[in-house]
Image: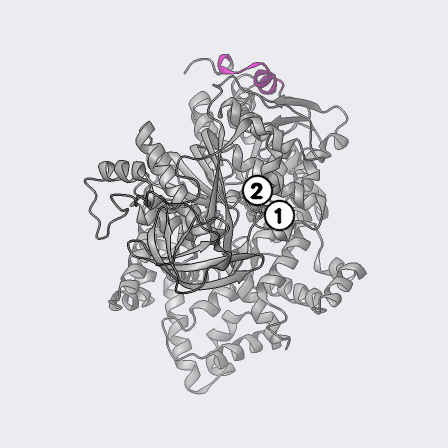
């Protein structure tokens, strides 16, 4: 490998070689921040002889951590494997595995995912006799999570008049007590949720200074990627770890802080300088990703925000094409225009489908895009749907694994005690939980003595369950992860039950379980995995984030995703759809300037995903919540300097793509080998009458004959007033039924 320092520009080089003391790298979009962070770590090891065991590098996804480790390994060799590198949750879970006993937890504590936590909250609400409709698990979970991210314990929560008052005002006065009971139940079950991995690490360092000092001496350098996405708890922990030597380097871009809803606090990066008087600030402003037009368009947008760190992103790349603005009558029309644009761009420039991404503000917007892509026979994938590890059959088997390893795990117990069904009803399960609470013992102690606590017929199936779990525990102790997992899947009865379901859905579930076993097999056969146990595999699975679970067997597809999911990615061609007021910016984010500025940062992130071409689209009407809504173009479109944008006329303005002969011709020639059961477009367009002139449609009525320049002759079926607009439903002879806005439709009324 060539000398890595020679590949860096001047600010990047400064960031890599100045390794000591506090440093903040303000990294503009596409400025190569990952390369800089990677080489900075490599430089510490290679040139300063710092043992990798003394370096902690924190990221937000396992994928990012792996990519960085692989890059570092190319420079320094196998020593890179000894770095403290990973997500905040995985690295702090590693610390807690060693120190959890000091907080009263077992070292093999279970990690609850979001569904586990919500299930336990639901149980707590029920046991407290509260209205489940009033205290919905999702609402309570988010409230508790927000408190933990701000380092507010249940004791502090109950003692805070403002928090308690807010809950009372929202007709949920018992949230503080739910938080208390939920926390105590997790503790009793030997379990931590995702937020606890951070909250309890901070608590460990606050209450056990000797432990903090041990890790302060061990961790000599702390590096944090995507610092703008950290919450208060994460920042407090890393500040404690770096307090002795102050060798802390944070990398981020305030302009890309878009996760406030997850607890991210932009003030961490905006105010970082206040905590370190001798802070070195280095700005990485050269963009290597996008054309000059895209960079300047993005700059003109983000310049409207007041709360930001000053920087000027620039590029030496080509000037590139103007940003194209696509205007559509409806959201369905928008989908058609986007699909046809993608196809034409692919055909003209020999792109792959994977060079295109469609970004939207909310998941529900994908419907019209998906339908249009399917009609056009364009392959696509939706990123951000139900992930593999969230599917029911997978969570069922994982619950068996987890309870086999930790018999204090109440959430897993509830999930599997009657799965497959063994005649143990909810009443019996409630009796087990009550007995454990009344006698201050674990549920495992109760079920091991089912005859004493329950007696009668209820004890027999529970005794059978206990025997299975004990046998599974022996398998886990004596066999590797795959052998143990395969035995549990078989002997639990889950695999048999799925195999016997011969429906398409049952087959799919069975194949999913087989895929899980395949994943465990791959884990065991990975030479880099020192611990081949099922427990080690479970910890890795528990820490997988949604972004990491994106396997796809056919990569050449158009990608569809929300803008939040797209952060950190780049594509040659980017389409941002739904550029309408109340959609983007979201009507939920207009109550304060801070919220509006986060929405603008989200738009900035979307723009800066584009390398070559950027398309923006909006619809004049859109069905939302079952009603047709008239839409206004987003205020963000006005933020873009007009010199960088043009209105697209490529597909005949806002008329149907099906009527465009150029598209029809290119589509037919490009898809000769595509087998389709339905025609995608009409081979020819309608040619209007020689004397065609649009009529005044104010007198239009049902039953009248009309002519449209694209759709031909038709009969008006129905007229409807929509606010200040009128729309007509028309049955056309060749193009079927269409609903048109009369203010846009060019109709000639035929009276004979």
Give whichever of 95, 381 is nearer the camera: 381
Give whichever of 623, 353 is nearer the camera: 623
Q: For the C terminus, give its image quadrant.
A: bottom left
The secondary structure that most of the magenta stretch takes on is helix
Q: Residue furthest bottom?
A: 456
As drawn, 608 above or below 564: above
The residue positioned 32% from the left and 29% from the top of the image is: 348
**Tag 1 secondary structure:** helix
Asked whether, in this view, residue 726 is left or right of residue 495, the answer is right
Residue 439: x %, y % from top left: 60, 76
Asked whether, in this view, residue 27 is left or right of residue 358, the answer is right
Q: Residue furthest front?
A: 752
Residue 5: x %, y % from top left: 51, 14
Residue 418: x %, y % from top left: 41, 73
Coloring scheme used: one colour
Q: What residue sits right under mark 2 in the picture?
A: 88
Give whichever of 238, 299 is nearer the camera: 299
Give whichever of 297, 395 is nearer the camera: 297
Q: What residue sits right under mark 1 in the picture?
A: 198
As drawn, 684 above or below 102: above
As drawn, 723 above or below 747: below
Look at the image and say whether residue 555 sits in the magenta stretch.
Answer: no
Look at the image and say whether residue 8 sits in the magenta stretch.
Answer: yes
Residue 629: x %, y % from top left: 54, 56
Observer able to see residue 16: yes
Observer able to see residue 407: no
Instruction: Give the extent of the magenta segment.
Output: 6-18
Instruction: Give the Cα distance between marks 2 and 1.
Output: 8 Å
Number of residues whose C-alpha sits closer than 10 Å to that of mark 1, classed few (under 14), some (14–19) or many (20 or more):
many
Q: For the N terminus, give its image quadrant.
A: top left
């Amino acid at each position: 490998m060539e000398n890595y320092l020679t590949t860096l520009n001047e600010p990047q080089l400064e960031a890599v070689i100045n390794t000591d003391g506090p440093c903040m790298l303000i990294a503009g979009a596409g400025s190569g921040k990952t390369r800089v962070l990677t080489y900075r770590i490599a430089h510490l090891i290679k040139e300063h002889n710092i043992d990798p065991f003394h370096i902690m590098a924190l990221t937000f996804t396992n994928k990012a951590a792996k990519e960085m480790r692989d890059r570092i390994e190319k420079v320094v060799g196998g020593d890179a494997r000894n770095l403290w590198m990973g997500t905040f949750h995985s690295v702090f879970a590693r610390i807690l595995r060693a120190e959890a006993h000091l907080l009263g937890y077992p070292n093999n504590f279970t990690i609850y995912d979001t569904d586990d936590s919500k299930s336990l909250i639901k149980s707590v609400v029920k046991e407290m006799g509260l209205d489940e409709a009033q205290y919905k698990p999702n609402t309570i979970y988010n409230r508790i999570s927000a408190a933990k991210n701000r380092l507010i314990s249940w004791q502090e929560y109950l003692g805070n008049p403002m928090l308690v008052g807010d809950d009372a005002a929202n007709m949920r006065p018992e949230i503080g007590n739910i938080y208390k009971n939920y926390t105590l139940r997790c503790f009793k079950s030997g379990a931590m949720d995702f937020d606890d991995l951070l909250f309890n690490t901070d608590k460990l360092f606050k209450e056990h200074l000797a432990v903090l000092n041990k890790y302060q001496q061990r961790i000599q350098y702390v590096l944090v990627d995507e610092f703008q996405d950290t919450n208060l708890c994460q920042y407090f922990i890393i500040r404690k770890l770096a307090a002795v030597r102050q060798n802390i380097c944070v990398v981020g871009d305030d302009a890309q802080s878009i996760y406030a809803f997850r607890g991210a606090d932009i003030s961490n990066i905006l105010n970082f300088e206040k905590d370190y008087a001798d802070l070195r600030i280095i700005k990485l402003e050269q963009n290597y990703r996008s054309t000059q037009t895209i960079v300047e368009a993005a700059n003109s947008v983000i310049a409207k925000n007041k709360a930001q760190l000053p920087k000027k992103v620039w590029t030496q790349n080509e000037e590139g094409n103007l940003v194209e603005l696509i205007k559509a009558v409806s959201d369905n029309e928008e989908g058609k225009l986007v699909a046809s644009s993608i196809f034409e761009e692919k055909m003209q420039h020999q792109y792959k489908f994977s060079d295109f991404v469609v970004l939207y503000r909310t998941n529900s917007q994908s419907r019209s895009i998906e339908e249009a892509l399917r009609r056009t026979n364009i392959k696509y994938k939706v990123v951000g749907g139900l992930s593999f590890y969230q599917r029911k059959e997978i969570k069922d088997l994982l619950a068996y694994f987890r309870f086999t390893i930790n018999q204090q795990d109440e959430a897993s117990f509830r999930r599997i005690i009657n799965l497959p069904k063994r005649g143990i009803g909810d009443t019996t399960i409630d009796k087990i939980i009550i007995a454990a609470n009344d006698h201050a013992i674990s549920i495992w102690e109760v079920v091991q003595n089912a005859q004493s606590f329950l007696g009668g017929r209820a004890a027999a199936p529970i005794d059978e369950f206990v025997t299975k779990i004990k046998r599974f525990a022996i398998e886990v102790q004596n066999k590797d992860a795959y052998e143990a997992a395969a035995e549990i899947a078989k002997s639990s009865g889950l695999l048999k039950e799925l195999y016997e379901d011969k429906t398409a859905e049952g087959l799919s579930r069975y194949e999913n379980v087989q895929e899980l076993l395949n994943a465990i097999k791959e884990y065991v056969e990975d030479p880099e995995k020192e611990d081949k146990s099922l427990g080690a595999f479970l910890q890795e699975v528990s820490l997988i984030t949604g972004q990491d679970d994106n396997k796809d067997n056919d990569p050449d597809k158009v990608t569809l995703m929300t803008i939040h999911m797209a952060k950190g990615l780049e594509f040659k061609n980017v389409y941002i759809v739904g550029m309408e007021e109340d959609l983007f910016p979201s009507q939920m984010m207009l109550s304060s300037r801070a919220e509006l500025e986060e929405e603008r940062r989200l738009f900035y992130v979307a723009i800066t995903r584009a390398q070559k071409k950027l398309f923006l689209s909006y619809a004049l009407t859109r069905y939302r919540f079952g009603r047709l809504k008239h839409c206004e173009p987003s205020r963000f479109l006005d933020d873009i300097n007009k010199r960088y944008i043009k209105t697209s006329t490529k597909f005949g303005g806002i008329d149907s793509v099906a009527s465009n002969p150029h598209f029809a011709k290119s589509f037919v020639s490009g898809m000769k080998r595509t087998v389709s059961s339905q025609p995608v477009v009409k081979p020819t367009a309608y040619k209007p009458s020689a004397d065609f002139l649009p009529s005044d449609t104010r007198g239009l009525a049902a039953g009248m004959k009309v002519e449209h320049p694209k759709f031909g002759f038709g009969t008006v079926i129905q007229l409807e007033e929509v606010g200040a607009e009128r729309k007509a439903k028309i049955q056309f002879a060749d193009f079927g039924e269409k609903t048109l806005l009369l203010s846009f439709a060019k109709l000639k009324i035929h009276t004979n």
